[in-house]
Image: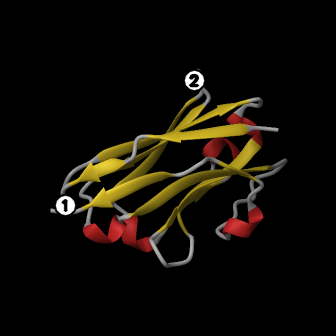
Amino acid sequence: QVQLVVTGGGLVQPGDSLRLSCAASGSTLDNYAMGWFRQPQGKAREFVVIWSRRGNTIVYTESVKGRFTISRDNAKNTAYLQMNSLKPEDTAVYYCAARFAVDGSYYDGHAAYTYWGQGTQVTVSS
């Protein structure tokens, strides 16, 4: 199984950038379909971006297209979420998640994921 540790949140102003990291241990991320999710206070958890194992398919939620980008460093077994042009509505706790996969499936429902990082608060406010 894989363990995920999320870092990189913080308080920023509108228009700023942040990069979140999801460091994995115990197994290589190549074996997992993954996603970044977020949960605004008092609201349901929603997907931000999801991708199939090895990243052959990547799906961004509409509200972050053109602003957020995922990347991965295989040597560090770490996935990243680069967030640019941040808006107040991006304020939420952000999580990375993983699900063991043997094919190119990807999942936009948070219930589909087995492993979760601990979450990091991102606050966008002037």
Q: Quadrant of residue 111?
A: bottom right
Answer yes or no: is residue 4 visible: yes
CB atoms of marks 2 and 1 within 8 Å:
no
Q: Name above or below for residue 18 compared with residue 65.
A: above
In the image: residue 58, left or right of residue 80: right
Q: Residue at x 21, y 63 (%)?
A: 125
Identify the residue under disc 1.
Answer: 14
Q: Quadrant of residue 68?
A: bottom left
* Of 104 and 89, the residue lying toward us: 89
Identify the residue under disc 2.
Answer: 76
User: What is the spatial separation of the Cα atoms under label 2 and label 1, in whole angstroms?
Assistant: 30 Å
In the rendering, at what x and y percent does residue 31 appear?
77, 39
Q: Dot 1: few (<14), some (14–19), or many (≥20) neighbours within 10 Å?
A: some
Q: Secondary structure at mark 2?
A: loop
**Label disc, if present, on residue 98 of the rendered structure:** none
Label located before the other in sequence (2 or 1): 1
What's the residue type where badge 2 is placed?
Answer: Lys
In the image: residue 107, left or right of residue 69: right
In the rendering, at what x and y percent does residue 108 appear?
64, 68
Q: Residue at x 54, y 51 (%)?
A: 119
Count of numbered tags = 2
In the rendering, at what x and y percent does residue 29 appear?
69, 37
Which of label 2 and label 1 is nearer to you? 1
What's the residue type where badge 1 is placed?
Answer: Pro
In the rendering, at what x and y percent does residue 49 appear?
52, 59
Q: Residue at x 19, y 60 (%)?
A: 14
Q: Dot 2: few (<14), some (14–19), or many (≥20) neighbours within 10 Å?
A: few
Q: Quadrant of residue 75?
A: top right
